[in-house]
Amino acid sequence: MSKSRAEKELEEFDVVFSALAHEARRRILVVLLGRHGEMTAGQIVERFSCSWPTMTRHLSILEEAGLIRVEKVGRERHYILNRQKLRHVVGGWLNWFEEEKNP
C-alpha cells in the first residue's frame, strides 16, 4: 500500500527534527550559515570541543536528513548547508498549524 502525502511529510519531519534535536547539530548548521553555508570538516571540528568520531557522526546525521550535502574537493570534504531543505521541512511543518482562512 502506498503512503499518503501526509504520511510521507510526517516521515520527513521525523528525520529532520530528529537531526535537529541535538544541540551540537543545530550549532553546526548555525556555524555553516555564518560561514556562507560551506566549510571543510576540519574547519567545523575546530569550532567544537568534541572528537573527530563524534563530529563525523553528527555530520553524517545531518547529511542523512538532507540538511547538509558533502562535496569532495581534492582530499577535503566540504560540507554545504541545504537551506532549501531546512525551510521546506520546517516551514511545511509550521504550515500545518496555520489558521484556516474563511472564504
Image (cartoon, rainbow, N blue to C red):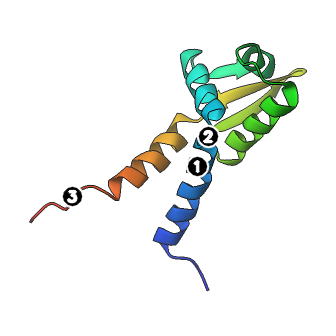
Q: Can residue 93 be seen in this view?
A: yes
Q: Which of marks 3 and 1 is nearer the N terminus?
A: 1
Please name the residue that numbered disc 3 is placed on: 99
Asked if the residue under mark 1 is in contact with the one under mark 3, i.e. CB atoms within 8 Å, the reply is: no
Q: What element carries label 2?
A: loop
Q: What element carries label 1?
A: helix
Q: 42 above or below 93?
A: above
- The image quadrant of residue 30 is top right
**How far from the left and from the top, in percent, is residue 11?**
58, 63
Q: Which of marks 1 and 2 is nearer the N terminus?
A: 1
Q: Quadrant of the N terminus?
A: bottom right
**How far from the left and from the top, in percent, is residue 18?**
61, 50
Q: Identity of the amino acid at label 2?
A: Leu
Bin the neighbour count of mark 3 within 10 Å (Cα to Cα): few under 14, some 14-19, many 20 and up.
few
Bin the neighbour count of mark 1 within 10 Å (Cα to Cα): few under 14, some 14-19, many 20 and up.
many
Please name the residue that numbered disc 2 is placed on: 67
Q: Identity of the amino acid at label 3?
A: Glu
Asked if the residue under mark 2 is in contact with the one under mark 1, i.e. CB atoms within 8 Å, the reply is: yes
Please name the residue that numbered disc 1 is placed on: 16
Which numbered disc, 3 or 2, marks the residue closer to the eye?
3
Q: Which mark is residue 39?
A: none
Q: What element carries label 3?
A: loop
Q: Which residue lies furthest to the left in this view?
A: 103
- The image quadrant of residue 101 is bottom left
Q: Identity of the amino acid at label 1?
A: Val
